[in-house]
Image (tube, grey):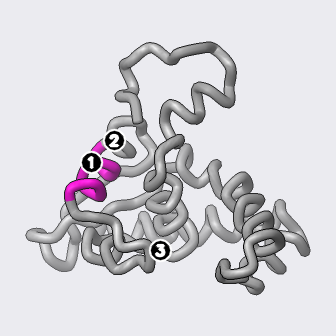
Amino acid sequence: MKKSNQISRSSCPVSCALDILGDKWTLLVVRDLIFFRKRYFGDFQNSPEKIATNILSDRLKKLEECHLLFRRPDPANARKIIYMPTEKCVDLAPPIMELVRWGAKYVPESDKHENLIQGFERDPVQFMVEIRLSLRKENEANKE
């Protein structure tokens, strides 16, 4: 992943997006932030993909540099860091959902995430409204 101040290799939107998101781990961290509400380093480490600690640290740092997440001390325990998705990050929910749908359809051994897919397919706009509202409430609760 390139740092946010580095020049993209082209002006193509796909290329620019891949400069930020195009490695093996970044979208999985974003997925965990948005859909599984993982907030602590240990939560991400416990994902089934078993990301190494050094890679996870690097991805969290780079996602923060690209303004896709912010970190702050946990209000309940200032020694712990809590990671929260930004609006920019949440804007990735629809394309990630399309990847979830594609994987569920074409990769037989993948988890199906049927409830998530059904909610998205039933009403994608309402799906996004609900995600944004719940994340805003969570952000407000974590500011206290």
Per the image, the residue denoted by label 3 is 37
Residue 103, image x and y in percent?
73, 68
Contact, mark 3 vs mark 1 (Cβ under 8 Å): no
Q: What secondary structure is found at the residue carrying circle 3?
A: loop
Residue 58, image x and y in percent?
27, 48
Q: Closer to the camera, 138 or 20?
A: 20
Q: What secondary structure is found at the residue carrying circle 1?
A: helix
Q: What secondary structure is found at the residue carrying circle 2?
A: helix
Per the image, the residue denoted by label 1 is 58
Magenta stretch bounds: 54-61
Contact, mark 1 vs mark 2 (Cβ under 8 Å): yes
Label 2: few (<14), some or many (≥20) within 10 Å? some
Of callouts 3 and 2, which one flags the residue occurring earlier in the amino acid sequence? 3
The type of residue carrying mark 1 is Asp
Q: CA distance from mark 3 to mark 2?
A: 19 Å
Quick one: which residue is furthest to the bottom in this view?
A: 115
Of callouts 3 and 1, which one flags the residue occurring earlier in the amino acid sequence? 3
Label 1: few (<14), some or many (≥20) within 10 Å? few
Q: Residue at x 12, y 69 (%)?
A: 78
